[in-house]
Amino acid sequence: MHANKSSPVPSNKKDAGGEEDITVDLHPFIREYKGGRVERFLSSSYVEASEDAAANRGVATKDVVVDESTGVSARLFLPAAAAATGERLPVIMYVHGGSFCTESAFCRTYHNYVRSLAARAGALVVSVDYRLAPEHPVPAAYDDAWAALQWVASLSDPWLSDHADLGHMFLAGDSAGGNIIYNTAVRAASGGDHIGVDGLVIVHPYFWGVERLSSSELVWDGVAMFTPELIDRLWPFVTAGRLNKNDPRVNPLDEEIASLTCQRVLVAVAEKDTLRNRGRRLAARMRECCAWADGDEKAVTLVESEGEDHGFHLYNPLRATSKVLMESIVQFINQRTSLPLPAALLPELHELHAYGGKKMDPCCLPILGVPTRPYMDVFGYGVAMKASSVPKGMTRTSCLHGGQGRRASKTRYGLSLGYAIRLNNKTNTRFSLSATATPGTCVSHNFI
C-alpha cells in the first residue's frame, strides 16, 4: 500500500573514511548519498487504518489503491456520527505536506490531523499518499493528485457512493500539499472532465520564485524555521532540475489563477513563516483575478496566525492557535461565517511587489492573535527542524513566541479572534471575539 515511499537499495559506497558521500544535503528534510540512497528525516510512525470508529475516536478509516499502475493510494476517513444522520457529507481531498519528498498520508502526524478534520467538519476525507521525490520527481505528485481527484469523482468506493456529496467537494493541503491542490484545481478548471470543486483550503503553501517579495526572502532573520537558502535549493532537487523557479506550478500566473472555477478559497499563513508572503500574494491575486471573487468579500479568506511558524498546527495540535485555525477551516467547509474578510483587509497587489531594498508598504493584516504558552512539540521533530535549518556559521538564539507582538507569558491565556490592523507599531482589533481562561485550561473545543 505504501511501497512508493521506499528508497532505492543502498549502494553502500563509502569514502576512505568509511562514510558515504553526501551528494545532496537538505536537512532537516532529506539527504541523498552517492549511489542513490535517500535518508528522510521529517517523518513520523506509520498508523494502521481501522474501520472500527469506536476505537478511532469516532472516525472509521480504510486504505484504498487509487491507481494500480503507479501504486498511488489513499486513506479514507468517515466520521461515524455524521454518517449516521443519513445525509450526504462534504468531501475533502487532502494532500499532505513534506516538501514533495517526505511524509505520508499513513503517518501519525497526518493520520491524527486528518482524523480530527473529518470529525470536526463532519466530512468524508480522502487523504492522498502520492509518490515522493527524488525517486519520483515532480510533476509525479501533481499527476497522482489528479488521478486521486478523478477517482474520488468516480464514486467507485462504497463509502463515497453511499455518503459523499460531490456538490460540496473541497481540495485541501498544507505546505507542498497546498501547492499541489492549487495546481490540481487549475487542472480541473482547464480539463474536460467537468469535475466540480466547491472550494480550496490552502495552508502555509509552498510557492516561490526568482524575485523576492520581502527582505525575509533574501536573508534569514534568525527566527524562521526555514532559511531562504534551503527553500531555494528544494525546488531544483524535487524536480530533478527540470523545472525552474519561475515555473507556473511554483510561481502561479495570473491567467491560471483567473481560470479557477471554485467558488471559495481559504488561504492560511503563519506570521513567522519565510513563505508567508507567497500565500498572502496568492490570496490577493485571487481576489483581483477571479471573476467569482469580484464583489464577494467572503470569496477569499486569508487567515494569518500571529507569532507562529510553518506547520505549527501539525507539530502541536493542542496549541490555542492550532485550535483556532482548525475551527476556521471547519467553519469554511460548512459554509458558516468563517472570518469574512472585507476586501480592504487583504493585501493589495502593489503592496506585495518584488523587494527592492526597501521595506514592504504597511498593509492591513487579518490576524488570529493568541497569547500562547511556550512552544511544545508533541510529535518530536518540529523543534529539530527549527534547530537544524540554520546556515553554517550561524547560531539560533531565539525561540518561538506568540501573542499580540509580545513575548509569551506563563499566566496570560486570553484568546482574541478578529482582524488586526498594524499601524505605527500599534495594534487595533476590530470585530473581536475574546474569551479568557484560567492557566492550564483551553478556551477552544478539544482537538480530537
Image (cartoon, grey):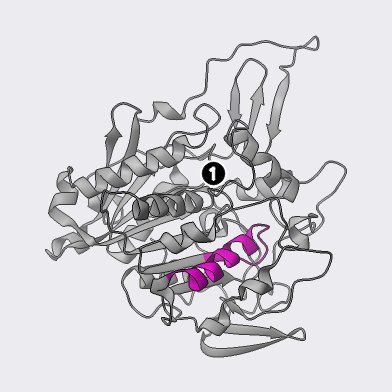
Q: Residues within 10 Å of mark 1 (few under 14, many from 20)?
A: some
Q: Residue at x 42, y 63 (%)?
A: 447
Residue at the disc numbered 1: 98
Which quadrant is the C terminus positioned in?
bottom left
Q: Examine the rendered structure and indicate whether residue 268 appears above or below residue 57.
A: below
Q: Residue at x 59, y 67 (%)?
A: 280
Residue 289 in the magenta stretch? The answer is yes
Q: Residue at x 54, y 68 (%)?
A: 285
Please name whichever residue, 375 or 93, is drawn nearer the observer in this view of the structure: 93
Question: Quick check: can you spot residue 402?
Answer: no
Residue sticking out furthest to the front: 255
Residue 49 point in image, percent of width and height: 30, 41
Residue 302 point in image, percent of width and height: 52, 72
Query: Quick check: 67 left or right of 22?
Result: left
Residue sticking out furthest to the right: 393
User: Which amino acid lies under the numbered mark 1 shown in the image of this protein?
Assistant: Gly
Which quadrant is the N terminus positioned in?
top left
Q: Residue at x 51, y 36 (%)?
A: 138
Query: Quick check: 64 left or right of 267?
Result: left
Magenta stretch: give its range: 268-290
Question: Quick check: can you spot residue 75?
Answer: yes
